[in-house]
Image (spheres, helix red, strand yellow):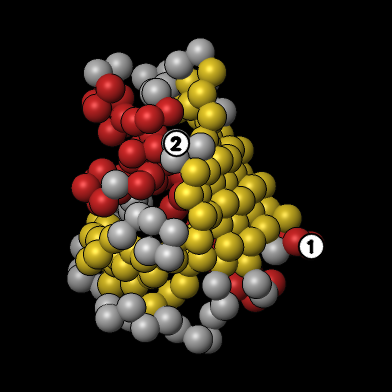
Amino acid sequence: MINNLQFDFTVDKERNTVFITREFSAERSLVWDAFTKQEILDQWGAPAPWVIKTKYMKFQPGGRRLYSMTSPEGQQHWSIQEFTSITPESNFQMLTNFADQDGNINSAFQSSENNLDFSEANGITTVRITIKYAAPAVLEMMIEKGFREGFTLTMTNLEKLLATLSGK
């Protein structure tokens, strides 16, 4: 495992946006699969000791993924993603909302717009993620609830999984 891989997490409160750049020592196709295939996503997508479980996922424009993050005590937080644009192994965009277990969107919070770009050079895949929140209050809530720390942990989960899957 390479320890000098880039990880940058920047919050721009004026634009209600989080910018994340993360490098992985793995081929782009494998990193793409890790972000877009339910069976791989469910192995890394929550900060331990929480676990993630996808109820359903259809990765195509207009398709959706409904999933929960579950605590060791059984507390569940549900979210739904709607895929709005997909360019294979290069980019996908989606809207993310808090929801209930049936996929009903929590209207108290507006969607976040997510853009994920994937590129590879010299065996290192870079993922650039932009998350734009509709309201400053939602961004503030996410920061207060430890989004940066949780995201950092999930990226470490992914790095370890990719090392196992790629044999590195």
Say whether residue 146 is visible: no
Task: State the residue lying farthest toward the bottom.
Answer: 108
- Name the disc covering residue 69, or none: none
Q: Residue at x 54, y 18 (%)?
A: 121
Between residues 118 and 68, which one lies in front from this camera angle? 118
Give the position of the C terminus as an image quadrant.
Answer: top left
Q: Residue at x 67, y 74 (%)?
A: 135
SS state under label 1: helix
What amino acid is labelled 1 in the image?
Glu
For the point 39% across and 34% down, the residue is 31
Label of residue 14 in the image: 1
Crowding at label 1, few (<14), some or many (≥20) Cα neighbours within 10 Å? few
Q: Nearer the viewer, mark 1 or mark 2?
A: 2
Tell me the quadrant of the picture where the N terminus can be found.
Answer: top left
Looking at marks 1 and 2 on the same chain, the residue that comes earlier in the sequence is marked by 1
Q: Residue furthest right?
A: 14
Q: Residue 101: horizontal and vertical position, in percent?
A: 27, 78
